[in-house]
Image: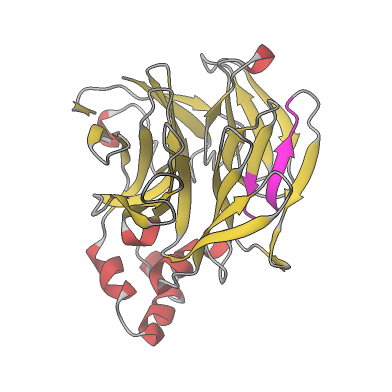
Amino acid sequence: MTTGTNRTLTVHPVPGPGAEDVVVGRSGADEGAVFTGTEDGSVFRVSPDGTKVDRVAQTRGRPLGLEIDLDGRLLVCDAHRGLLRVDTRNGAVEAVTGEVDGRPMRFCNNAAIAADGTVWFSDSSTRFGIEDWKADFVQNTRTGRLLRLDTDGTVTVVLDGLAFANGVALSRDEDFVAVAETGARTVVRRWLTGPNAGMRDLLCSNLPGYPDNIARGSDGLVWVTIASPRDPVVERLQTAPMALRRLATRLPERLQPAPRRTVRVQAYDDDGRLVHDLDIDPTTQRTAYHMVTGVREHDGRVWLGSLHEPAIAVVDL
């Protein structure tokens, strides 16, 4: 198993905080470039060596999960606006869907695209938006959903009752779709084909911290971010009476539980076996980069995004 011991994190700044997710371009002028979205709604293209950063679009929302669509455009999960498509050549932004059963999504988060164009994506909460993500997490509303967008535009709820639905990934053969449950420290697997089709189980559980985005890498593995280590105080609150949970989320920010500083990602094969565990001590680096929420393995390099940092990062396998 590969670990993070003695590995160096290289950080590439971008002009805005919260470069939450990352995806690597596949063709043309975008090949090898890394895309990310920031708090102010910007979508940036970063050259592979980090020396050139271009703003390619403005969503006028809060871009989170990013994928490359079948036609080469970016599919953007915008926390405020829902699913968008972005043409990186001219910055055009097209609204795809922002509703489920006639009601606006509160927290569109992450996606994966199948070979036939079907989009699997998450809505983290039906009660809280991204600005109040801690409230949903601590109150443990379990209103997260895994959704499917068919090529005819139909949106279907595939799984609900998830504890903060987050990252989404498909298996190598697309026989299952996986969705991270941040609040439960698990990655749920929903089988699409074979004898288990329609059934739900776990790809991995009892993770060492709280998973955020997940993504299938060029190595065929499902990469999982660990945004923060497990917090026993938070987990006690999650099972406390609801009145106490609500009280905790109304405390001043300085008194609330906060994510601990860490840089960690793991990779699992389709049978749920742990293959890589990159746990990099941020205190040994020349940067304070932390809270990894986006991951993308591409040709032996692991690109990282962060909900808070004004930068993306990369580590070589």
> 124 left or right of 263?
right
* Vertical comparison of 250 with 74: above or below: below
Residue 276 in which image quadrant: top left
Residue in the image at 64% along x and 50% along y = 149
* Vertical comparison of 148 with 266: above or below: below
Q: Which residue is nearer to you in this view: 117 or 48?
A: 117
* Vertical comparison of 4 with 265: above or below: above
Query: At which x and y percent is residue 277?
Result: 24, 34
Query: At which x and y percent is residue 251?
Result: 43, 75
- Give the residues in magenta: 77-88
Query: At which x and y percent is residue 133?
Result: 50, 62
Residue 201 in which image quadrant: bottom left
Residue in the image at 64% along x and 18% along y = 30
Q: Which residue is nearer to you in this view: 129 or 114?
A: 114
Residue in the image at 70% along x and 27% along y = 71
Residue in the image at 53% along x and 15% along y = 48
- Which quadrant is the N terminus positioned in? top left
Q: Is residue 260 visible?
A: no
Residue 126 in which image quadrant: bottom right
> 194 left or right of 16?
left
> 258 left or right of 233?
right
Magenta residue check for 86:
yes
Q: Which residue is nearer to you in this view: 222 or 190?
A: 190
